[in-house]
Amino acid sequence: MEGIPKKTFTPLGEYVSLHVHKVDQTKGGVVLPQGVGDPSNSPTATVIAVGPDCKWVKEGDVVVCHMDTAARNVIHQGHKVVVCKESQLIGVSIKVEDD
């Protein structure tokens, strides 16, 4: 898996650009985004950049995505990112320390 792409543009409005963490592939080469087949396993992504109207997430946050969003795959300056509205995210992941 590639590392997290650098910020190459700033989204407008409430849009965010994301780097999706895990993508699985079948033996036949079909790419299955994390969460397909198991609705309890929603994909996570790192926020690369946020638009000026975003209120809940910031750069570097790890967010939980909804598989049914109207997200767009974008390749900009050679970096593949996903762009969606902040309101299409489910929430921000919180790191929990093991006891």
Image: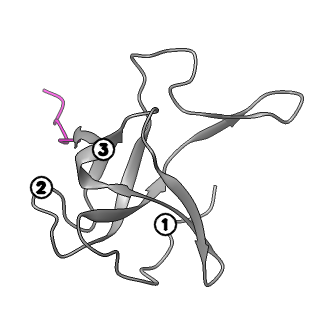
Residue assigned mark 2? 56
Q: Which range of residues does the magenta coloring cover?
A: 92-99
- Residue 42 is left or right of residue 32, and the answer is left
Judged by depth in the image, the label closer to the viewer, 1 or 2, is 2
Q: Is label 3 in a helix, a strand or a loop?
A: helix
Say which residue appears at 23% left-offset and 47% top-offset: 87
Inspect the image, locate mark 2, and give the three-letter code of the amino acid beneath it: Trp
Q: Main secondary structure of the magenta part?
A: loop
Residue assigned mark 3? 88
Say which residue appears at 55% left-offset and 42% top-offset: 22
Say which residue appears at 49% left-offset and 50% top-offset: 20
Quarter of the image with the C terminus in it: top left
Q: Residues within 10 Å of mark 3 (few under 14, many from 20)?
A: some
Sequence-first disc among 3 and 1: 1
Residue assigned mark 1? 4
- Residue 93 is left or right of residue 84, and the answer is left
In the rendering, at what x and y percent does residue 93 appear?
23, 41
